[in-house]
Amino acid sequence: MQDEEVLAEFRASKALLEGHFLLSSGRHSAHYLQCARVLMNPARAGRLAVALAARLPRELRRDIQKVVSPAMGGLIIGHEMGRALDVDAIFVERPSGTFELRRGFTIESGEKILMVEDVVTTGLSSREAIRAVEEAGGTVIAAAALVDRSAGTVDLGVPFHPLIQLNFPTYAPDELPPELAAIPVTKPGSRAQL
């Protein structure tokens, strides 16, 4: 799947939003990718997961024993990646602020894990989820995401394979350009609202 085909999937599902958004990273942007919308159609979610799995090197695909994704945003794409790779897919969640395994999910000592996200901007959530997997005994051998908003600059500490890299500018709260500051801010993600 080429970049323009990926963006076409986002546009077709009205998942590429424009306005003034507060990202989960705490940064602001004039663009937001609402992956829940692009993934709400099971056939589309499956196509995107198959395309993302195809981006992984063959030897890496052979080594993956389980997919782990952070709740909420990574749940659907993580599940679909498990299907595409024919391995179990589980998730970590933050019941009290830090990621942990719940719901009877387990990771065997040394189990080789692919961390899967929907969108990576700063990589903070991914690194926190990777730490939770490692604390549970797993070995994260790579990470994957539908979208890398860092345009290739993020460092997750493991090889990172996005389906698409985008370079939508993001801003710290004290760096907002006047035209963005003039637009009311919204927080469309899964974390607490403004």
Image (tube, rainbow, N blue to C red):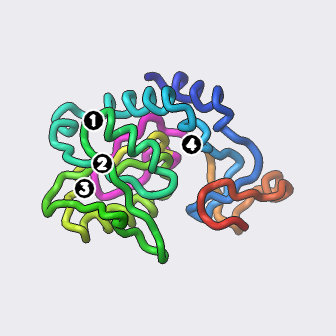
Magenta-highlighted stretch: main secondary structure? loop
Give the Cα distance between marks 1 and 2.
Answer: 9 Å
Identify which residue is drawn at 39% across, 38% down. Answer: 80
Residue 150 belongs to magenta span: yes
**128 sits left or right of 111 in the view:** right
Disc 2 designates what residue?
67
Image marks 2 and 4: residues in contact by CB distance under 8 Å = no
Identify which residue is drawn at 16% across, 35% down. Answer: 59
In primary-sequence order, the first of circles 1 and 3 is 1
Give the Cα distance between marks 2 and 4.
Answer: 18 Å
The magenta stretch spans which residues? 149-166
Q: What residue type is labelled 4?
A: Cys
Identify which residue is drawn at 64% across, 64% down. Answer: 172
In primary-sequence order, the first of circles 4 and 3 is 4
Residue 159 seen anywhere in this rendered image of the structure: no
Q: Is residue 35 above or below residue 128?
A: above
The number of callouts visible is 4
Image marks 4 and 3: residues in contact by CB distance under 8 Å = no
Can you tell which of label 1 and label 3 is closer to the viewer? 1
Residue 35's tag is: 4
Q: Is residue 186 above or below residue 145?
A: below
Disc 1 designates what residue?
85
In primary-sequence order, the first of circles 1 and 4 is 4
Q: Which amino acid does label 3 sit on?
A: Val
Give the Cα distance between marks 1 and 3.
Answer: 16 Å
Disc 3 designates what residue?
140
- Mark 4, Cα crowd under 10 Å, few <14 / some 14-19 / many 20+, is many
Query: Given the current orientation, which residue lies at the most extreme left position?
Result: 110
Q: In this view, does 26 lie above or below 188?
A: below
- Mark 3, Cα crowd under 10 Å, few <14 / some 14-19 / many 20+, is many
Q: The residue tagged with tag 2: helix, strand or loop?
A: strand
